[in-house]
Image (spheres, grey):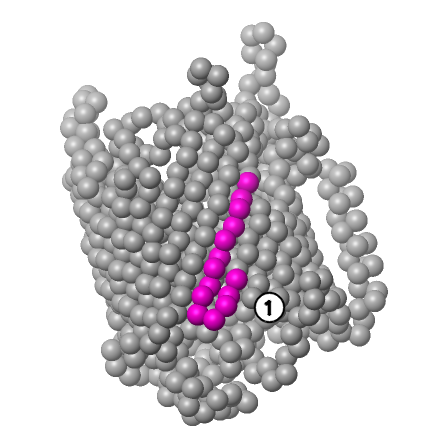
Amino acid sequence: MKSIFCSLAVGFIMVYLLNQPLHGQSWMADAPDNDIEQLLNNLFPGPVDEEGLEDLYESLLLLYQQPIDINTAKYEELRQLFMLSERQISNLLRYRRSYGRLYSIYELEYIEGFDRPFIEALSEFIRFDRNREKPRGILPKIDKSTQHQWLMRYGRILERRRGFTAPDTLAGGRSSNRYAGDPGHYFMRYRMQKRGDYSLGFTLEKDPGEPFRWNPAQHWYGPDFISGHYRLENRGILKNLIIGDFNFQSGHGLIFGPLFRMGKGDEPVRTLRPAPSGFKPYTSVHENVPFRGLSASLEKGIWSLHTFYSSLRRSSSPIVEESDGESLLTGNLRSSGLHRSPGELAGRKNLREQSAGFSLSAIPFLHGNLVLGLQGVGTRFDKEITPIRRRYNQFAFQGREQFNYGFFINYRAGDMLYFSEWSANAQGGRAILAGMLGNLGRSLEASMLYRNYSPLYNSFYGNAFGESAINSNEEGIFMGIKYMPLRGLSIKAWSDYFRFPWLRYRIDAPSYGHDASLVLHYDWRENFRLRLQYRTRERWRNIPLDFDSPLYSPLPANTRSARSDISLAATESLWLHTRFRWSRFLQYTTYSSGFLIAQDVEYAKKQWMIAARMAVFDTDDFDSRQFVYERDVLYFFAVPAFHRRGVRYYITTRLHANSTYSFWLKWARTRFTDQDFIGSGLDRIEGNTRTDIRIMCRIKL
């Protein structure tokens, strides 16, 4: 604990020293935290990966801090805003070709599809640079436009969990399973950057239960997770150079996918296909870092080349055997990032992964409307990976080496975008996706995507659209529409039909399913918001043939859910939100249902923001659990799941003390009315309440 307070003290001293020569700089306004979180809440209302959302949130936040130059932004850069439709992008590019540079935000009103309310929302993420200074030389230039940001966060569960109790002794003097560290969650991040020039930063994190250690022989350097990067931009044909941790997104996700997969959310058109962002510094706290090494992006004329080399250590199952002098790993890669108990610590960073890859694309003709790309990646492990075989994972990766290769194509015709990607691996697996999205009229947008991923296909870094967590053993077709008959009113619907040619976990036969949603969203005069959603989902699942039989029979399981969100501005500073969730699960003779009602109050004026909630939930089991978005501290986006019966209440406060210092505090408690303990295993809490606290400080220079 003393080391933590020492680290925080050193951090504050460093920030103070950095601040001394920079008093003359101009401060940037704070990002619209509420608007960005509301956007993410609308796009992804269901269960999501919090670490992936953190990366997406930061991408949008960086767009606010480093707005896109509307006069030079290419098609893919404009798509990263999520706000622009294909028609709006096409009209903007057409206007630039016809009339040249835009000089003012008001000039956007002359472009079809850009009305004043939309322009006001867009203005936070764009700029109109005229004589922007270009970076010169290899070394970065630190001046008054350089931004410094320091983040520090602490959190914990106040109730004692079993993993933090005194261990029991066993025969032979050995102790039973317990967590090696204290229950606190510690996070620290520093980043220095200059728009379009360079970026430098590092991230430190310790999860609850993990120890602080210094043992280089075991790859311990204080906290369990350490990440860092150095980035240079716009040096001639060298557009991007990163040393350290980075992620890579190219094509449509089959080989190099985004950290967070989009598609089946509130927006069925604009988020269907990820916008390729190339190499980006990895700043998330998810410990399954995609790449660590060196990456470079080169551009010359119609050609773009992205290439990289990565070498890092992964955690895996702790069972390692020697076979004829070769290391043999029997088990799977572990992606949770938790190293708390003896079992988790035994497999920590015991596997080295090396990878190298490239993505080459060209815009040969058709006025830049056609893009062709070729890409590939090779991966090698220092141990033989041999998963424990089950019937459903007969085609899982086995061995030490893997190679994926493929190509992609994009073609824009008017207000429509057509795209496709094909990929294969060395084991003979194949994967293909093809789709289209765009405007069919002034008020109608549509999308469609077909995918076919063979059971033999697997990709360590892919994350394309799909029903499964991995792009394997799946075929399906997705269709979506968005209709905007009146200003502020949008009707969105999508349907996804899919099948699985081979067995899956808890499904002992080939199966199929479907997923469909209907959403109505209405905004009235910026002080009233209404969102209604109905969703039905069917997937197969094993059920026992009878009570005494070990055999199972797969049968379809259907889940229906409804959601409503009503937001009302009582005053200019006070918002009231009423949220309702309901679901019903049905399989054969098994039936369960659940609901949740939450009332939120949010007050924001000048430097203060206070958000509070009272929620009541009642569900029959885990299958009828409910999800609802919560306001939290900066960079901590959560959509927790609630099951059983109980109440949940929290309060979150934010204070922007001045242009340099900002503080967040969250206190939350869940109380269950139908059980005497919470959780299981080492996470078990004796009692029916769980209390979480989080404290955060941000320093901007």
Residue 663 in view here:
no
* Residue 374 on image: x %, y %: 37, 56
87 lies left or right of 571 = left
Dot 1 corresponds to which residue?
A: 236
The residue positioned 61% from the left and 41% from the top of the image is 225
Q: Secondary structure at mark 1?
A: loop
Tell me where the magenta segment starts and ends, as one range. 298-311
User: How far across and down, in percent of the image, does residue 137 sit?
Assistant: 70, 66
Tell me residue 243's x, y (percent).
61, 51
Name the foreground residue: 701 vs 388: 388
Q: Is residue 671 magenta?
A: no
Is residue 299 covered in magenta? yes
Position above or below: 456 against 608:
above
Q: Main secondary structure of the magenta part?
A: strand
**Quarter of the rendering occupied by the C terminus:** bottom right
In the image, what residue occupies the spot 64% across and 55% down? 230
Quadrant the N terminus occupies:
top right
Image position, residue 659 (x, y; %): 71, 70
Which three-letter amino acid code belongs to the residue tagged 1?
Gly
